Amino acid sequence: MHSRNALRPETEILRLGARPLAWISLGVLLCAVPAPAQSQQAPTSASPAVSAAAQINGQTQPQPATGSITGTIVDQTGTALSGAHLVLTRDDNSAGHVATSDEAGQFFFVNVAPGSFRLTVSARGFVTQTVSGTVRAGESYAVPAISLAVAGVTTQVKVMPTAQIAEGQIKQQEKQRVLGVPNFYVSYVSDAAPLNMQQKFQLAWHSSIDPVTFGIVAGTAGIQQAFNQYSDYGQGGEGYGKRFGAAYGDVAISTFLGGAVLPSLFKQDPRFFFKEDGTKKQRILYAIAASIMCKSDSGHWEPNYSGLLGSLAAGGISNLYYPNQDRSDLAVTFEGTAIGIGATAGENILQEFVVPKFTRKKGPKPNPVPTMDGDSTQD
């Protein structure tokens, strides 16, 4: 290859013009300078490889050994996605390139070796997508716009055991008081979880040992002594103690039989479920019916065997510790049970219309409550 400063005959002819000595010197020079070597084969047309290897100042530049990849990430509406994570890998599992889409959703990979590639695109909340292609040396490969689909929404539901739900509801009930008096056997959650045996006994126990319960029993025994009821008990401290024990026995036995033992045996719920919705007439009828009906542990309404039999059994057991002349026969026991049903109906009406206004720590607003046939009514 000649130096860039070598003389070219054509240029010299134009420069020297018609000077005679110049022509003589040119002739000598033309004889001294060897003719340039002729190419064995002239190129017929410019190929992409030749165009890629541009000639600068007479020298051929080397052909680029790598390419580049560009593209845009959008969502299904065509909006650009910024922050999408892209990983470029090769079929030969060589080390990959990593990039992130910019605010316009665009991404760029440079110095990419020629050959096939895989492009994995991921973004938070979207389905991961993979595209592939082939990039050539010196080529800027434009990937068609990559549209990512929104990922399906996955809802995680934490399922709590029924007993655990019921335990939390009992804790709430045990805070319910009406002017300080326990109101534990009323649920303001109409679809409350059923109680297991342990929880039924737990509720009965807490009701029986509540300080207010002891206070009411103490007041009842004092009134009985003042009016000399159950005279065989006598007066003084001993007489008061017997009256207190009998009165507390009535409360504890009735509470455990009607609220724990028999409900566990018959699989019934001993609580009253506040209704609140419906007309006044419907709520009154509901309260009256709840004195002889109750919810089973499966959620259906049925006759309150637990409450009725518990009242009869408590009346019969009381004959064991009351004086002989004050013991009641079977007819009186049934009469007392009937009176108890009426009293329960009246109490339920108060629970439905009056008591909630004075109940501290009342539970959440009730959900739809089952009707007597097992259907539910809405607020």
Image (cartoon, rainbow, N blue to C red):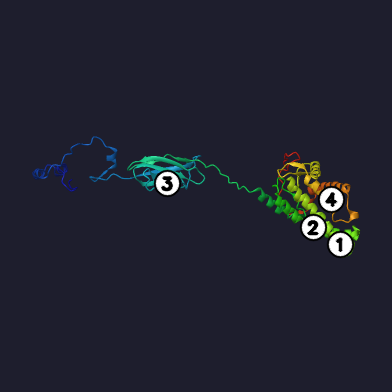
Q: Residue at x 40, y 45 (%)?
A: 88
Judging from the image, what secondary structure is the residue with disc 3 in? strand
Q: Which residue is mark 1?
A: 240
Q: Position of residue 375 (x, y in %)?
A: 72, 39
Identify the mark nearer the N-term, 1 or 2.
2
Q: 176 or 293: nearer the eye?
A: 293
Q: Which residue is mark 4?
A: 316
Q: Is residue 236 visible?
A: yes
Judging from the image, what secondary structure is the residue with disc 2 in? helix
Identify the mark nearer the N-term, 3 or 1.
3
- The answer for how far apart the CA atoms under marks 3 and 2 are is 72 Å
- The answer for how far apart the CA atoms under marks 3 and 1 are is 88 Å
Eye-nearest disc, 1 or 2: 1
In the picture, which quadrant includes the C terminus? Answer: top right
- The answer for how far apart the CA atoms under marks 1 and 2 are is 17 Å
Identify the mark nearer the N-term, 4 or 2.
2
Q: Label 1 neighbourhood size at 10 Å, few (<14), some (14-19), many (20+)?
A: many
What number is the disc on residue 213? 2
Eye-nearest disc, 3 or 4: 4
Judging from the image, what secondary structure is the residue with disc 1 in? helix
